[in-house]
Image (tube, coloured by chain):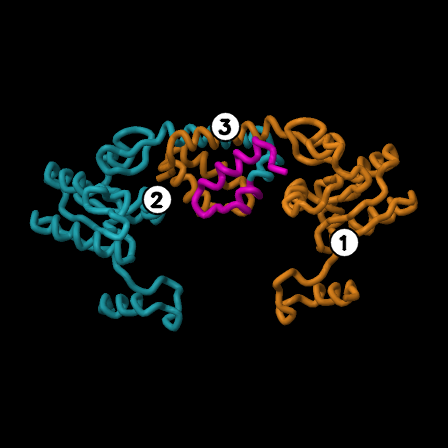
Chain colours: A orange, B cyan
Amino acid sequence: MQYPEPIAKLIDSYMKLPGIGGKTATRLAFYTIDMDGDDVTEFAKSLVAAKRDLHFCSICGNITEDDPCVICKDKSRDQGTVLVVEEAKDVMAMEKIKEYRGLYHVLHGVLSPVDGKGPEDINIASLLKRLQQNDAIKEVIIATNATPEGEATAMYISRLVKPAGIKVTRLAHGLSVGSDIQYADEMTLFKAVEGRQEM
Amino acid sequence: MQYPEPIAKLIDSYMKLPGIGGKTATRLAFYTIDMDGDDVTEFAKSLVAAKRDLHFCSICGNITEDDPCVICKDKSRDQGTVLVVEEAKDVMAMEKIKEYRGLYHVLHGVLSPVDGKGPEDINIASLLKRLQQNDAIKEVIIATNATPEGEATAMYISRLVKPAGIKVTRLAHGLSVGSDIQYADEMTLFKAVEGRQEM
């Protein structure tokens, strides 16, 4: 016996989401049937709306409803600094700390030769164009993740940007706040020693 | 800075699903934006369709598009046996082994005084009515889960059904196939010894 078609289709749809396999998809599908009807309708609407109404900002590549995005439009922000991140989610994470008041540039990926991802596959060209057209930018802060691909991408961008006389910095790597030295991995400890600061 | 409204709404919707917290919901929402447009539309449609087109079978309580469900309608199945399960998912699990050819009854829950769930909150009355109206049913197999609530529900149903002269059986409990005795929990080992069979 097969699942009734509507539920089989819903299971298939849930399985297209990352990290959701057959068992979880089945659980979610059955849960959906027991959900409040309005919640399900709302869910369906927000799926379609998110896909339809959200675009990438033509300047920084961040996810936005309007183009340019609220950050690029906000002239009260420091126009001299651009923080380069891998994903739009990273912009939100940075904004949460309310410390950084400059602009952003979202790469939408990292250089990864293994996955066939070269410089033309991520938002690097638009970053360079932005730097060329805008003399106000004095510093590029590279905030790619602390993975081999993130490091390689940081290095690549740094080599392209530095000759133009723009300061290039990278977020500090070291021990997370609240972490134990004994549980830190070797690379993190190495970076923490390397980046030690005078007290 | 807040997330753009369409994505904030989508995150809220994802968070209504069981086992999905804020971080996973955010990841899924951003993933949705990168998904193929047709897949998203399909997803939204299947959500609405599953909620709209699926009902509970008026006889057995299984999830179905048509009423009665394909199992209740199938006269080639053994009309003398009813297997009682907690959830519609359990019917699918039983059907997969292709061994059981009788009918089902879905309780939609178990007796759980802690959660305020009494006999009137689950599908027990309809089971009794079904047994009264249908002389063909000779055996009721209780396949509630091996949890305290499942056991209590099994006991409760057994006491109601037995006086009517209907055979009541319970699925065997013991070691899972392929499991190690050393890793089995005490209750399972106890059940395995208690239910030992002659070779």
In this figure, which residue is indicated by the disc labeled 1?
A: A151
Instruction: Determine which quarter of the picture holds residue B192.
Output: bottom left
Q: Main secondary structure of the magenta part?
A: helix
The chain letter for the residue carrying disc 1 is A
Residue A125 has which mark? none
Q: Which residues are magenta?
A: B1-28
In this figure, which residue is indicated by the disc labeled 3?
A: A45
Same chain, marks 2 and 3? Answer: no
Q: Classify mark 2: residues with Cα within 10 Å, few (<14), some (14-19) or many (20+).
A: some
Helix, strand or loop at label 1? It is helix
Is residue B48 or residue B91 the one in the foreground? Answer: B48
Helix, strand or loop at label 3? It is helix
Pointer 2 and pointer 1: residues touching (CB < 8 Å)? no
- Residue B139, position in %: x, y? 16, 48
> Which mark is nearer the camera, 2 or 3?
3
The chain letter for the residue carrying disc 2 is B
